[in-house]
Image: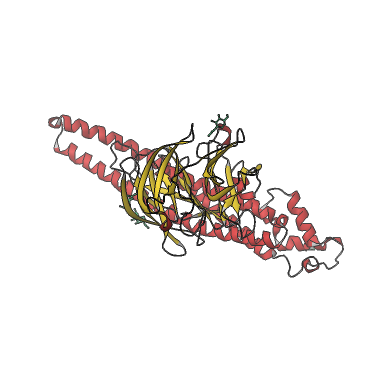
Amino acid sequence: MIGTLYFLALLSSTVAWGPVDLWSEESVRNETGGGGGDRCTCDAFLPSSTFPIGDLVAVEQTVVEISHKLEREMGKLEDYEAKMTEYAEKIVKLTIEIEKMEKDPDAYNEDDFQNTKVEIKQVEALIAELQLSINGSTTVFESVRVEVTAVVATLNRLEKTYDKNLVLVTRREYVKVQLQLEECERRHQELFNPNIGSCAHTGISKLSQPIVSQLNAHLSTSYTFGGWGKDSKPLPDRESMYWYSGATTAGISSIRFYTNYKNLILRNAFQTTSLKSGWTGTGNNFIIRGNTLYYQINRPFSVAKLNFTTMLYESRVIPKASSSISYANSPNQNFDFAADESGLWVTYATVESGGRMVIAKINEASFGLEEEWQTSVYKPGVNNAFMICGVLYATRSIDVHIEEIFYMYDTKTKQETHISIRFERFREKYSNLDYNPTDQKLYMYNDGYYLSYHLWFNHTATTTVQPPHVVT
Ligand SMILES: *[C@@H]1O[C@H](CO)[C@@H](O)[C@H](O)[C@H]1NC(C)=O
Ligand SMILES: *[C@@H]1O[C@H](CO)[C@@H](O)[C@H](O)[C@H]1NC(C)=O
Ligand SMILES: *[C@@H]1O[C@H](CO)[C@@H](O)[C@H](O)[C@H]1NC(C)=O
Ligand SMILES: *[C@@H]1O[C@H](CO)[C@@H](O)[C@H](O)[C@H]1NC(C)=O
């Protein structure tokens, strides 16, 4: 007698990337009874309840629908891209025409001017139309994200309660749509913000809804401290690599690496490195840059690095930095590392400034501090901070789900500004929030949830002719 569960396990372990409808309730029942009609129920194999096949089937249907939706959106994005190129060419043509008219107005009559004006109006109308369509896509992505979040929650629940193998096929389908969503969003983002690496903007204008990549890699709700993300200056063969480190207390003792996003979601680490005795870290505001972990250690209290290429550790004491002043809501977060378009940074509070934050630029070659900036923002009132284009952004909580970027400090001008850019998170607390200049995204470790956000920036008046950038 082959039990349903055993059959399911067998099926899921042998059928990789199998057809989605494999899991229909009928076919499972038919196969189960296959031997000769003996009655066999799941109850015999589970302590309390049957495996909720219905949940799995529902999840699969959702996954298929999401996938179709995303295919349609991808088609639209390709359309927008083509239109954008067309409009950009029109704008260039009109600009040249206007320049000619300005240089030699006498060569043109009133009709010529009128025609040019009409053409400009037409391009304007086309761009407005495009913006509307783009808004449509944004709405679709937002609703898809909600669906994807529900799917990942169900899968995690099933994986936690039952054997992980039972859910494997569905999870693989889920991974495919998650990747599809990421790809769609990346294309969407590139269309309207094709300036990765550029600092020709005056700061963040808004954040997307949070994108959930994982509820918890350890399938446990107690890994509330940690971080995840990508290397901000990856080695040439590690551009698609992701890393993750989670812990039940504010510290770091090991870190996992995944070859790519798919393996991150599938929890297939290709390497897990434990920090050697005497070098385990405290706090969770670590980052990886140049295949090197930058983090905080407590004996002696200092900034530390571990180069994964050589497996060599190094540390530096920063005498002024306080070892007790942390961010709000999370203990031990004394040093916060950040990387942006201009390099590597660390922030901390000092006792002499009454707990206000200091920004320091780290020289990557020497691991020494190049320059420091004293801000007026009080660290215990800040949840977390990150750097973009040499500007510090600090966050605080508005309520259990709403976060606000409320403060910025520009190290180039030494100017500070109070702003209000709000965004959502899923859980109340988080211990790691960082910007990654390679994809212009923010990564958050939100009490075990891996969240990321797309960013939009305020652009100064466009000086050159280029495709319209939507920065609503
Ligand atoms: C289940 O098996 C019965 C008897 O072999 C068959 O008539 C029925 O179509 C099968 N159902 C499915 C969904 O395959
Ligand atoms: C796009 O949506 C945003 C917010 O929903 C709105 O403020 C903006 O006016 C819309 N843009 C267009 C072109 O409709
Ligand atoms: C960008 O512009 C928006 C709207 O004008 C404003 O609310 C926001 O504070 C600006 N961002 C920065 C960083 O100045
Ligand atoms: C790590 O070690 C490699 C090999 O010696 C070296 O090339 C690289 O610069 C080091 N990286 C950092 C960030 O120290």
Q: Is residue 454 above or below residue 146?
A: above
Residue 357 visible in the snapshot: yes
Picture quadrant where residue 370 is located: top left
Please tell me which residue lies in front, 4 or 414.
Answer: 414
Give the side of residue 169 with respect to residue 153, left or right.
right
Which color scheme does this rendered protein use?
secondary structure
Q: Residue at x 48, y 54 (%)?
A: 324
Residue 128, how many percent across, how many down?
A: 32, 49
Residue 230, how many percent across, how many down?
A: 53, 43
Residue 118, how many percent across, how many down?
A: 23, 43
Please tell me which residue lies in front, 9 or 140.
Answer: 9
Please tell me which residue lies in front, 12 or 256.
Answer: 256
Check the image and name the residue furthest to the left: 106
Picture quadrant where residue 25 is located: bottom right
Q: What count of labels does the image hold?
A: 0
Residue 250, how many percent across, how many down?
A: 56, 54
Picture quadrant where residue 363 is located: top left
Q: Is residue 97 above or below residue 43?
A: above
Residue 75 visible in the snapshot: no
Where's the N terminus, which quadrant?
bottom right
Give the side of residue 136 with respect to residue 180, left or right.
left
Q: Residue at x 28, y 45 (%)?
A: 122
Check the image and name the residue furthest to the bottom: 48
Give the side of residue 316 with respect to residue 112, left or right.
right
